[in-house]
């Protein structure tokens, strides 16, 4: 199965990191999205993800191209603009064994696809919903998106007069049980959050500030590398420990909080800047609003509640993937039809 | 109170119409009249007489005018009839207009205080003191409004010679299990009957005489028939959004799934049903579920199809299966949402931007609603594409008598899907490679183990290996193959049904127009104009359709829309025969009737 050299390290499934890569990226050199892709590959490798169970969904835009750049063993579906959540919903219901990764952008999710974003989160679709957030429409060459900060400027000099929509506070408001914000320039934090996300059963909303080097990386932009680096306030150091039946869980010293997932995996949270409780929903909302008011990007695991049942459980679906049910399992008998016909006579 | 029938106003010697009449009931919606009307319809049905019902209702919850037409026909004609022999007028707001529009000689049962009997001299009036009767028969004042309508059922039963035992049976059936409601309604019907026995003379305009035409038949609507087809087809994912007149299709399915789609061991559900946020999302769920290997469906109407059209094009181009029921209503825009039309023909034939062609199924009766719904899932998986099952409000929501549905014994066709072993053995597999030359490629399903078969589905340009491509030759290869696939469908879709009287003149219709066309064909034949009738049941047009078009001197295309949409499809498909097609159109929101077809074909013939 492995295509790399025999000496390349393998994970518990026997895969090398090379088994998790995708096709070559066609995005601009230095694009933040490519850094995210790299961490998805790392996290999937380190989390021992079964590549053939991975599905990768996207809508339209630069971000939506990226599912082609990771985990070629998985199945990709690049759909229509803003409609990725419906695709993820349908496929995840058809086969509840799938590991669903949706990659969207700020335009795809916060404008044209806002309705679908909201309802996918509300339904707690089992998926990692990544928003590669650069505040700008890249593929159509540089128009403002709905997450652009008020008062920020386009490369062309145009000023944004409207307030931004924040995907994170919105997701918390909608009842999402795993909300995080990261910066594509902070691979360590992104890696830990992605690994935690793989262990989570419902919708993960992951807003990743990802500067657009071509259209939004100038001095007057609040989404430039420099600006984000200067205003990135990581909340904590995260240590993710995947559940294992054989290994003792080793929580690092100094962890202020340990959150346990239904599968036994744990994330250890060690606060850096402030005493932040990511299990406190209202506290999280308050802290995010306060930091936004100061022009900061609060990054890390903003809110977590691993107990919420994902949609297939809410619908009380059979454990076997619906797509694999046989005719004998789903087709009622002639006696049933006879009974129904009698009732209509 | 001395109500008595006026002398029959029909011409001397006119025969009593036995089991051959229409009754129109005018009420206010939300007043329980639907129950009363269904009881009257069922009672006649139980007398062994062919009967059909049309509910003409407003887009409103309560308080607006509604009409219900019951037609009995010894010959089995079940289309709406343009004229009515009996009127039951309960709505003060519309009574005067209803009287003005009624046919000479009609019997008019009306609520006494409306004082309608001076309006026209050529009608027979039967004023009924409904309020007095309901007060006497029903002890609970708060129920008076709801059971008042059941009184006219009793009065009509008496006048038509419908057996009251059948009325009682119908009430029991209609109010299944609600003992108190059954008792109160039966008492109200009886009160009407007893009053009529005491106060009315016999009439000899119209009568019900016991027959045996309905033995073993069922009464059902098309939405329920489609829901049952989907149930037996084993649908596993349903994404939907409420819309008149399509909601009851999924709602009925939900009821049946609750009973028949639970895993016996665990009680867990073998179908996922999600009410989505809109039709766009519903379409996405359907196609993605189909892509992932489930049998999936949605049910909608014209405005919903418009919203879904972007996704439908994606489904066509990436080749994802899914079943789309369109229970058509009167458009454009919101149009008349509670009225019927066949005006989504072109929309569903070519739904979405770019070059798109879709397989469409047009059931024309209840058995076909059931069977085509079942078949649609096979076709979707065989052809890996969205399939439209196009019905309309008339088929979907009205009551139709039908033979009981035959068990669909044919095993499911899950199409060309490669499993882990087949993928391992396949040489140079490509998701969009036309190995068999029929335009249908082999697909793999997400989650298949073994490291083979994964591919990237994209709505953008792709080649035979599902790789991104903007090359002209790759693009053309894919879209030409899609056309080849559509050609292949010609030998898989339902073939037309013929009713040939032996004539070079053709009549062509589809869907809910069928009963009216059959009746019109008989009327025309009696008048000396024989026709051959082809009932179209699917797109693409099959070889039988080709032959009919080539053979006939003229083809009257009967359809329920303004623009002759099916005629357009025929002119486009058969340009060399374009002048043969004459549109016979009906599009006022009411179900089509035979008279309209007869009049229009006759006018064409006289030109």
Image (cartoon, rainbow, N blue to C red):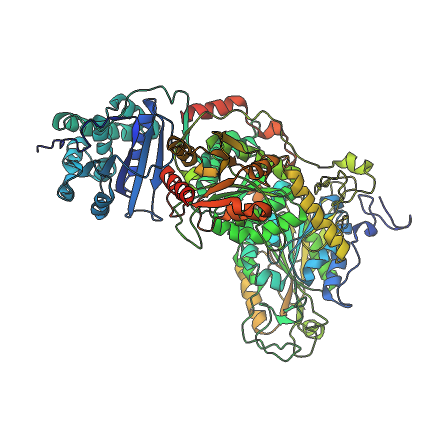
The quarter of the displayed image where residue B577 is located:
top right
Residue at the spot x=58%, y=24% of the render? B409
The quarter of the displayed image where residue B265 is located:
top right
**Residue A28, placed above or below residue B48:** below
Quadrant of the rendering where the C terminus of chain A is positioned:
top left
Q: Position of residue B178 (x, y in %)?
A: 32, 29
Residue at the spot x=62%, y=30% of the render? B412
* Side (left or right) of B163 relative to A234: left
Farthest residue toward the right?
A6
* Side (left or right) of A148 relative to B502: right
Which residue is more in the foreground, B91 or B12?
B12
* Side (left or right) of B507 relative to A78: left
Which residue is more in the foreground, A258 or B103?
B103
Q: Is residue A70 visible?
A: no
Which residue is more in the foreground, B494 or A139?
B494
Residue at the spot x=22%, y=38% of the render? B104
Farthest residue toward the bottom?
A157
**Residue A338, placed above or below residue A257:** above
């Amino acid at each position: 199965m492995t295509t790399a050299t025999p000496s390349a390290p393998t994970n518990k499934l026997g895969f090398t990191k090379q088994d998790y890569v995708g096709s070559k990226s066609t995005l601009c050199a230095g694009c933040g999205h490519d850094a995210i892709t790299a961490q998805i590959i790392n996290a999937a490798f380190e989390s021992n993800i079964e590549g053939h169970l991975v599905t990768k969904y996207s809508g339209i835009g630069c971000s939506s191209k990226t599912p082609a750049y990771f985990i070629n063993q998985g199945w990709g579906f690049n759909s229509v603009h803003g409609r990725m959540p419906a695709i993820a919903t349908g496929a995840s219901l058809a086969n509840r064994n799938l590991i669903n990764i949706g990659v969207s952008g700020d335009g795809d999710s916060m404008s044209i696809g806002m309705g679908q974003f909201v309802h996918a989160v509300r339904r707690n679709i089992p998926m990692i919903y990544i928003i590669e957030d650069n505040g700008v429409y890249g593929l159509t060459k540089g128009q403002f998106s709905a997450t652009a900060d008020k008062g920020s400027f386009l490369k062309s000099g145009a000023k944004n007069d409207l307030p931004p929509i924040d995907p994170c506070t919105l997701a918390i408001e909608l009842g999402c049980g795993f909300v995080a914000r990261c910066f594509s320039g902070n691979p360590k934090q992104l890696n830990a959050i992605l690994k935690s996300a793989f262990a989570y059963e419902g919708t993960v909303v992951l807003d990743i500030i990802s500067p657009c080097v071509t259209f939004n990386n100038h001095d007057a932009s609040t989404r430039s590398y420099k600006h984000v680096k200067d205003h990135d306030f990581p909340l904590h150091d995260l240590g993710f420990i995947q559940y294992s039946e054989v290994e003792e869980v080793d929580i690092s010293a100094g962890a202020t909080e340990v959150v346990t997932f239904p599968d036994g995996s744990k994330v250890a949270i060690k606060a850096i800047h402030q005493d932040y409780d990511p299990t406190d929903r209202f506290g999280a909302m308050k802290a995010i609003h306060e930091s936004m008011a100061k022009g900061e990007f609060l990054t890390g695991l903003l809110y977590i509640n691993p107990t919420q049942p994902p949609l297939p459980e809410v619908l009380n679906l059979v454990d076997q993937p619906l797509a694999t049910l046989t005719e004998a399992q789903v087709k009622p008998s002639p006696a049933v039809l006879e009974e129904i016909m009698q009732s209509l006579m | 109170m001395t109500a008595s029938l006026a002398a029959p106003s029909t011409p001397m010697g006119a025969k009593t119409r036995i089991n051959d009449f229409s009754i129109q009931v005018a009420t206010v919606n939300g007043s329980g009249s639907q129950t009363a009307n269904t009881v009257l319809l069922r009672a006649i049905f139980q007398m062994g007489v062919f009967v059909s019902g049309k509910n003409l209702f407003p887009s409103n919850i309560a308080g607006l005018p509604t009409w219900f037409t019951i037609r009995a026909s010894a010959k089995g004609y079940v289309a709406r009839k343009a004229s009515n022999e009996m009127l039951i007028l309960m709505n003060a707001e519309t009574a005067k207009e209803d009287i003005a529009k009624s046919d000479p000689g009609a019997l008019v049962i009306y609520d006494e205080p409306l004082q309608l009997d001076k309006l026209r001299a050529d009608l027979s009036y039967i004023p009924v003191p409904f309020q007095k009767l309901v007060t006497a028969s029903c002890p609970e004042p708060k129920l008076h409004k709801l059971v008042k309508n059941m009184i006219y059922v009793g009065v009509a039963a008496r006048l038509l010679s419908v057996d009251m035992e059948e009325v009682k049976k119908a009430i029991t059936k209609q109010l299944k299990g609600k003992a108190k409601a059954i008792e109160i309604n039966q008492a109200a019907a009886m009160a009407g009957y007893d009053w009529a026995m005491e106060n009315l003379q016999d009439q000899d305009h119209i009568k019900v005489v016991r027959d045996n035409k309905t033995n073993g038949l069922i009464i059902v609507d098309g939405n329920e028939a489609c829901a049952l087809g989907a149930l037996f087809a084993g649908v596993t994912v349903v994404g939907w959004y409420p819309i008149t007149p399509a909601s009851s299709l999924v709602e009925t399915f939900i009821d049946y799934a609750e009973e028949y789609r639970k895993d016996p061991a665990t009680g867990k559900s073998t179908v996922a049903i999600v009410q989505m946020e809109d039709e766009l999302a519903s379409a996405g769920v359907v196609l993605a579920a189909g892509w992932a290997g489930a049998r999936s469906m949605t049910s909608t109407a014209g405005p919903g199809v418009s919203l879904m059209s972007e996704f439908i094009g994606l489904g066509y181009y990436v080749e994802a299966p899914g079943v789309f029921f369109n229970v058509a209503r009167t458009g454009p825009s919101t149009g008349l949402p509670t009225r019927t039309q066949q005006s989504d023909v072109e929309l569903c034939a070519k739904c979405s931007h770019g070059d798109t062609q879709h397989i469409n199924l047009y059931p024309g009766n209840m058995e076909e609603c059931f069977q085509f719904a079942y078949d649609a899932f096979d076709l979707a998986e065989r052809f890996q594409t969205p399939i439209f099952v196009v019905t309309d409000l008339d088929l979907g929501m009205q009551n139709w008598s039908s033979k009981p549905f035959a068990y669909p014994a044919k095993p499911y066709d899950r199409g060309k899907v490669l499993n882990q072993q087949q993928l391992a053995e396949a040489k140079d597999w490509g998701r969009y490679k036309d190995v068999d030359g029929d335009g249908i490629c082999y697909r793999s399903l997400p989650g298949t183990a073994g490291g083979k078969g994964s591919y990237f589905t994209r709505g953008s340009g792709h080649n035979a290996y599902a790789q991104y491509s903007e090359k002209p030759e790759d693009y053309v290869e894919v879209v030409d193959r899609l056309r080849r696939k559509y050609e292949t469908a010609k030998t898989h879709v339902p073939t037309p049904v013929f009713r040939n009287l032996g004539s070079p003149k053709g009549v062509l219709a589809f869907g809910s127009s069928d009963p009216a066309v059959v009746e019109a064909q008989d009327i025309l034949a009696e008048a000396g104009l024989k026709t051959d009738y082809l009932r179209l049941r699917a797109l693409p047009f099959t070889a039988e359709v080709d032959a009919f078009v080539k053979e006939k001197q003229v083809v009257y295309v009967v359809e329920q829309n303004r623009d002759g949409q099916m005629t357009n499809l025929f002119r486009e498909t058969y340009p060399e025969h374009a002048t043969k097609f004459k549109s016979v159109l009906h599009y006022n929101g009411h179900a089509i009737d035979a008279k309209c077809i007869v009049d229009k074909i006759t006018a064409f013939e006289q030109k």
